[in-house]
Image (cartoon, rainbow, N blue to C red):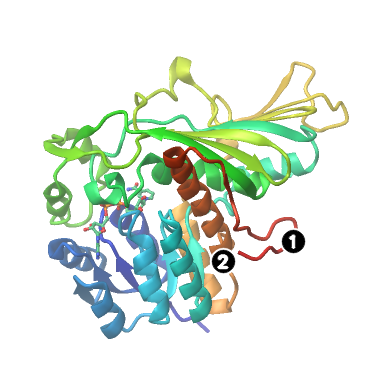
Amino acid sequence: MRERKVKCGVVGCGVVANEAYFPAIVEKGELVATCDKIEERARRSMELWGAKEYYTDVDEMLRKANIEAVFILSGMGMHADHATRAARAGKHVLIQKPLATTMRDARKVFNAIKKAGVKALVEPNVQMNPLYLKAKSILEEGTIGEVYWFRAGLGRGPPTWGEETFFTRQAGGPLFDLGVYQIAALTFLLGPASSVTGMAKISIPERFIVPEEFFTEHLSQKPYEPFWKKLATAKPTKRIKMEAEDNTFTLLSMRSGSLGCVIANFVTPDGLRNGVGNMPDIEIYGSDGALFLGGSAAISVMTKRKDSKYYSPEGWYCIPKQDFPSWNYYRASTEHFFNCILNDEEPLPSLEWGMHVSEIMIKSIQSSRTGNRLRVLSSFKWKGESVEC
Ligand SMILES: NC(=O)c1ccc[n+]([C@@H]2O[C@H](COP(=O)([O-])OP(=O)(O)OC[C@H]3O[C@@H](n4cnc5c(N)ncnc54)[C@H](O)[C@@H]3O)[C@@H](O)[C@H]2O)c1
């Protein structure tokens, strides 16, 4: 018997929806409705990906469309509101990162989803990524001993589109756009954080981005063509104000005892990852060695433990990048989300974990504005222990 397909609606028909999620949804599910406040984006996305209906208002889509799941792919500061509305309408939700950019919104969406009892998958999905699973197993084998400290993130130039999506105070800026990946990975590898201190500022108060019409126009071309190449030829002519901190440092104290720093900004030259600047994305140091993610290898391990299978007399044991073929988290999440709905299982990138990641980022920015170190109160299932939010 063929398994039924999950009927879906999508809120936010922008770059990530068209580049990543629509292809995954039409492959594994049933795309029923598109929704964007820019009517042409909603309509053109519907036509491009074979949906039945389009909407410009989220509530109208939730009321009228025959859907059971909603993909929340709008701007970073809107996810919580859109997901709250969807959950209250009884729909399962896949939420792009971050879950929320204020604690008020985070609590609201968390409670709405819990009350509705719907499935919620919060991106970015690190829990199923073979790279992080391998790194986690290396750490859990005690290869580097007790973890003492870590450094993660680097920064890069800003996106060149999406004023409301990335740059407003409500959207949150690079910590929520880039730092979220490292905080997601670190909490998966090392467990929950207990407190956070942030230091952040706006270093470049004005930017130029590509006008919204450029992407809307791109959607008039059939079939859909990858956007990135075209974006590189576009002129950033729209002047915008940077309302969110574009240069951020987050100091974390983890419940398991280690301390570390996450760097996220829009003020670093692009391309540093190549050539001489081939820096790891995450470095973790312990009593018996160190583990790096990214840089010249996928994973690099140094251990003093001669009985470890990662011990190398030359120093570093490197797992090459080709051992981890590119992994599409959007596709993996979409399929996992559908399976969880169909089989009544809980998504691995859970609501509790998404809440914890967002609380860290929100409190980092809060701390940078107030000068206080802040406790992180939420938690998630870690080593079999479940802690209430
Ligand atoms: N672009 C990427 O490569 C990428 C990768 C990973 C994650 N993300 C995340 O995905 C989300 C969207 O990013 P994007 O690059 O697609 O941005 P985008 O600006 O291209 O798309 C966002 C869309 O949401 C729409 N929207 C805004 N308010 C709305 C409302 N009230 N109702 C309906 N639609 C509304 C906008 O009109 C826009 O079309 C962000 O949270 C971003 O962090 C993007």
Determine whether the residue tagged by mark 1 lies in a helix, strand or loop.
Answer: loop
Choose the circle earlier in sequence order: 1 or 2.
Answer: 2
Residue of label 2: 347
Residue of label 1: 385
What is the three-letter code of the residue carrying label 2? Answer: Pro
Q: Is residue 303 above or below residue 34?
A: above
Question: Left or right: 150 with respect to 183?
Answer: right
Looking at the image, which is closer to me, 377 or 286? 377
Q: Which tag is nearer the camera, tag 1 or tag 2?
A: 1
Which residue shows up at 31% across the image and 28% down it? 203
Residue 310 on image: x %, y %: 77, 30
Residue 348 on image: x %, y %: 59, 62
Question: Left or right: 347 with respect to 313?
Answer: left
How many marks the image carries: the answer is: 2
Q: Is residue 158 above or below residue 19?
A: above
What is the three-letter code of the residue carrying label 1? Answer: Glu
Residue 231 in view: yes
Q: State the image quarter where residue 57 is shown.
A: bottom left
